[in-house]
Image (cartoon, grey):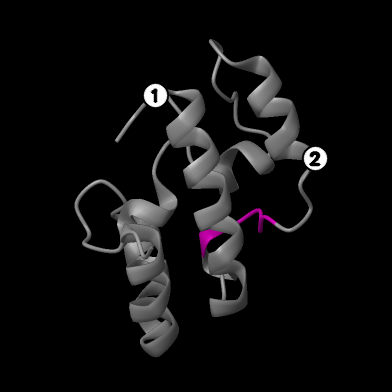
Amino acid sequence: MRDKYDEAIEYLTDNPDIIHRAWGEASTHPQGCLFGYVGTGGCLTMIRNGWRGDEQHPELTVMIRADERIPTSGGDIVPADLPVFAEWQRKIDVILQRD
């Protein structure tokens, strides 16, 4: 069953020039769901790059930092990376009990 992450991947794969904008405007951009914050700890790329991470879920921060598939900058995200972002957002949805 397709979800919002699958739809965002499809759109951004067809329109890769929009990826950085969607990343930078994650909370308001239609495809920004792939780049949402991990609690209050920043987005996946920020945490991977050493940003503080989610203090309520330090184990999540450790796992994100260890995942070398996550780019360390929004400008480095390419269509091939999008499934990794979707995978993480689905995990985060479950852990943080968000819709």
Residue at point 35%, 68% (across, down): 8
**Prevailing SS of the magenta stretch:** loop
Question: Looking at the picture, how far across and down is residue 26, in whole percent?
Answer: 32, 51
The residue indicated by pointer 2 is: 66
Query: In this rendering, which labeled residue sits more in front, label 2 or label 1?
Result: 1
What amino acid is labelled 1 in the image? Gln
The residue indicated by pointer 1 is: 97
Q: Is residue 6 above or below residue 65?
A: below
Front residue of this view, candidates 42 and 8: 8
Which image quadrant: the N terminus? bottom left
Residue at point 39%, 79% (across, down): 10
Front residue of this view, candidates 41 and 9: 9
Is residue 55 left or right of 31 when viewed as pictured?
right
Residue at point 47%, 31% (across, down): 94
Q: What is the magenta range?
A: 70-74
Residue at point 66%, 16% (across, down): 58
Identify the secondary structure beneath mark 1. Answer: loop
What amino acid is labelled 2 in the image? Ala
Question: Looking at the picture, how far across and down is residue 53, in whole percent?
Answer: 58, 25
61 magenta-colored: no
